[in-house]
Amino acid sequence: MTTPDARELDGLGALVRAVPDYPTPGVTFRDITPLLADAVAFNGAVDSLADLVAHHGPVDTVAGMEARGFVLGAALAVRLGVGFVPLRKAGKLPPPVESVTYDLEYGSATLEVRTGTVSPGSRVLIVDDVLATGGTAAAAVSLVGACGGDVVGAAFLLELDGLGGRDALSGLVVDSLLTVGS
Ligand SMILES: O=P(O)(O)OC[C@H]1O[C@H](OP(=O)(O)OP(=O)(O)O)[C@H](O)[C@@H]1O
Ligand SMILES: Nc1ncnc2[nH]cnc12
């Protein structure tokens, strides 16, 4: 594993495309697909995320939110040698499920987890690509908590500054590899 220096972080940041007025006017969408498509950058980002969360000590599970959280969460789970729990959008998982509805920067959504996937008392790390308002991550925290999981923290590839994400997750340890203004 490697700790990225400022130059490496700048390199990763340069592979996140800013798309003005998408998906709604006034929102600048941060598109991580160029970073994911670059083998060196994607590998480096996963290594750096693993370093960033090492202070938690061992975790039992990574939980990631559909859809972009699956990409980074599953890759990080493999790198950490732990299992992955998918937190899915409504109606995708067969019952029984636990569910929670939340607001987004551009709408609202429901997250679900299959009952029994999170072991009670297990140490769970929440992972997603972007922290914006924190609504998705807060929903993930409450979903995993409702299953009896012990959420040790949340980690993101990219934090959008100024949208209140950290405030929405107050009391939780939040790690972000990159930060940009919203
Ligand atoms: O902090 P928040 O304001 O909740 O926003 C962050 C969430 O928004 C995006 O997901 P989105 O719901 O757009 O779904 P996608 O991953 O399927 O594109 C992103 O991947 C995060 O999950
Ligand atoms: N501005 C944004 N760009 C990418 N993903 C997001 N999720 C919520 N807000 C976002």
Image: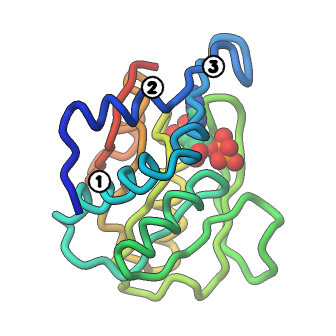
N-terminal label among 3 and 1: 3
24 relative position to 69: left or right: right
Please say which color scheme the image uses. Answer: rainbow
Residue drawn where x is 59% and y is 61% of the image: 70
N-terminal label among 2 and 3: 3
Cβ–Cβ under 8 Å for marks 2 and 3: no
Give the alpha-carbon distance from disc 3 to disc 1, as whole Å. 25 Å
The residue carrying mark 2 is 163
Q: Quadrant of residue 20?
A: top right
Residue at disc 2, CB closer than 8 Å to ligand 1: yes
Give the alpha-carbon distance from disc 1 to disc 2, as whole Å. 24 Å
Q: Quadrant of residue 57?
A: bottom left
Cβ–Cβ under 8 Å for marks 3 and 1: no
Q: Quadrant of ligand 2?
A: top right
Residue 181 lies, in percent from the top left, at: 40, 19
Q: Residues within 10 Å of mark 2 (few under 14, many from 20)?
A: some
The quarter in which the N terminus is drawn is: bottom left
The residue carrying mark 1 is 48
Residue drawn where x is 63% and y is 39% of the image: 103
Q: Secondary structure at mark 1?
A: helix
Q: Nearer the viewer, mark 1 or mark 2?
A: 1
Q: Nearer the viewer, residue 73 or 132?
A: 73
The residue carrying mark 3 is 19
